[in-house]
Amino acid sequence: MTLLNAWKVTIRTPNKGLRSINADDIDDRTKMKTSFMPTGLERTMTQPQFLDLVEYLLQRRSAPAK
């Protein structure tokens, strides 16, 4: 979820797109139990690539929503 307010929710889709949904159209919200990251992806990465990924994810987590 990239934006949540009283009127709409904006989510990031797996294909890097954004989708906005009117809050009135949402009946239920459930946090995903799995990640968009494919299982085992970390095993295909070098240590520097993995560290870059973790750094990127941490930056996204702390960045303000647009």
Image (tube, helix red, strand yellow):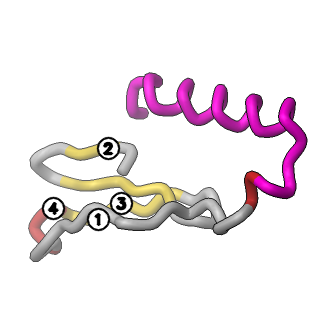
Contact (CB < 8 A) between labels 1 and 4?
yes
- Residue 24 % position (x, y): 10, 67
| Residue at mark 3 to residue at mark 4: CA–CA distance | 9 Å
Contact (CB < 8 A) between labels 3 and 1?
yes
Residue range in magenta is 43-66
Q: Name the residue rendered at 40%, 56% in the picture.
A: 11
Compare marks 3 and 2 and give the one earlier in the sequence: 2
Location of residue 47 with respect to 32 vertically, above or below: above
- The residue carrying mark 4 is 23
Q: Amino acid at mark 4?
A: Ala
- The disc at residue 21 is 1
- The disc at residue 20 is 3
Q: Is residue 35 magenta?
A: no
Q: Amino acid at mark 1?
A: Ile
Location of residue 53 with respect to 40 vertically, above or below: above
Q: Is residue 65 magenta?
A: yes
